[in-house]
Image (cartoon, rainbow, N blue to C red):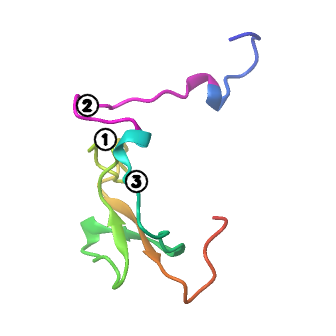
Amino acid sequence: MAEENAPQLVDYFVVAGLTDTSKPLEEGTSKLARPVEPIADVAIIIRSQGEEVPEGFTCIETTPSGQSADLNCGLLSTSHMFLCYRRGREKLPLIDL
């Protein structure tokens, strides 16, 4: 670090967890014929309590590198929480969380 101040997030940001089959994002994306619908809703589900993915939502269960996308991964909690999203144009798209 250049100065002896408190550490900042950017001082420790790294890309980790890539596997031999991982591709850079620009190589791993495909060209779509039409634009993707905007994200209109998000939800958090707790799989360990038996919650199911809400109707019309998509659950993010793995990261692009194949790791678990459990929001509690690495914590002592036994709750398995996942982010779900729904795309559509019937509501205004999310622009902030």
Q: Residue at x 41, y 62 (%)?
A: 32
Q: Is residue 44 above or below residue 68?
A: below
Q: Residue furthest bottom?
A: 90
13 inside magenta stretch? yes
Residue linked to disc 3:
71
Q: Residue 28 at x, y = what percent?
A: 35, 44
Check disc 2 and give the amino acid type.
Thr
Q: Residue 7 at x, y = what percent?
A: 67, 23
Residue linked to disc 1:
65
Q: Quadrant of the C terminus?
A: bottom right
The range drawn in magenta is 11-24
Q: CA distance from mark 1 to mark 2?
A: 7 Å
Q: Which is closer to the viewer, label 3 or label 2?
A: 2
N-term-proximal mark, 1 vs 2: 2
Q: Is residue 91 above or below residue 78?
A: below
Q: Quadrant of the rendered structure where residue 33 is? A: bottom left
Q: Quadrant of the N terminus?
A: top right
Check disc 1 and give the amino acid type.
Ser
Residue linked to disc 2:
19
Q: Residue at x 39, y 35 (%)?
A: 24
Q: Residue at x 32, y 31 (%)?
A: 18
Q: CA distance from mark 1 to mark 3?
A: 16 Å
